Amino acid sequence: MNIETRIEKIQNPNEITYKRHCNCDVVIRDLSTCRTCKVIENLIPAMDEVLEVVHYRKRKSLFYRTIIIGKRFSVDVQSGLGSGYDGSGPTGFYHVLYKLGFAEEIARIAYDRKHDNAVITLKKII
């Protein structure tokens, strides 16, 4: 599987916008990392195929949001998945990426600490 991986550093955290992803079919919010991962694992078979994952990070304001775009529907994950630090959020994000079919070396992007404010995009090249 060919994957386009992009980490976009954002200078001004207010520039991070996810307006193009505000109409997802499923919204996950206010769950722990463990529960979020379980919900996503249960949704994976129904998604049929994952086409793109977009992860928004504003580390200093503790804002993390992940959009999973599947062939049949999209999921807006507003809690439970983090990145760029040591903890359960990035570990959960890593496991979700791996369960979605991304190779281990790509899933490790969950631990990338390069930028406090970033948009991480993983997109299948068809």
Image (tube, grey):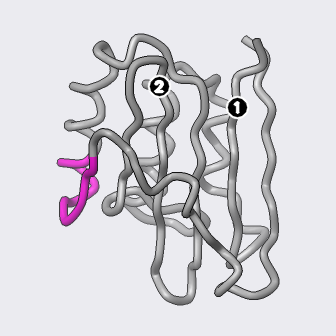
83 vs 93, left or right, is right
Picture quarter with the N terminus: top right
**Tag 1 near tag 2, CB within 8 Å:** no
The magenta region covers 27-36
> Residue at the spot x=58%, y=78% of the render?
58
Query: Relative to 30, does residue 63 appear above or below in the rendering?
Result: below
Front residue of 76 and 62: 76
> Residue at the spot x=21%, y=37% of the render?
39
Magenta-colored stretch includes residue 71: no
Residue holding disc 2: 70
> Residue at the spot x=19%, y=59% of the render?
31
Q: Position of residue 116 (x, y in %)?
A: 68, 78
Q: Secondary structure at mark 1?
A: strand
Mark 1 and mark 2 lie on one chain; the one further toward the N terminus is: 2
Q: Position of residue 96 (x, y in %)?
A: 42, 36
Classed neighbour count for the residue bearing mark 2: other residues with Cα under 10 Å, few (<14), some (14–19), many (≥20) = some
Query: Relative to 78, does residue 91 appear above or below in the rendering?
Result: above
Q: State which quadrant residue 111 falls in.
A: bottom right
Picture disc at residue 54: none
16 vs 49, left or right, is right
> Residue at the spot x=41%, y=35% of the render?
74
Classed neighbour count for the residue bearing mark 1: other residues with Cα under 10 Å, few (<14), some (14–19), many (≥20) = some
Magenta-colored stretch includes residue 29: yes
The amino acid type of the residue labelled 1 equals Lys
| CA separation in Å, label 1 and label 2 | 11 Å
Q: Position of residue 76 (x, y in %)?
A: 38, 50
Picture quarter with the C terminus: top right
Residue holding disc 1: 123
Q: Secondary structure at mark 2?
A: strand
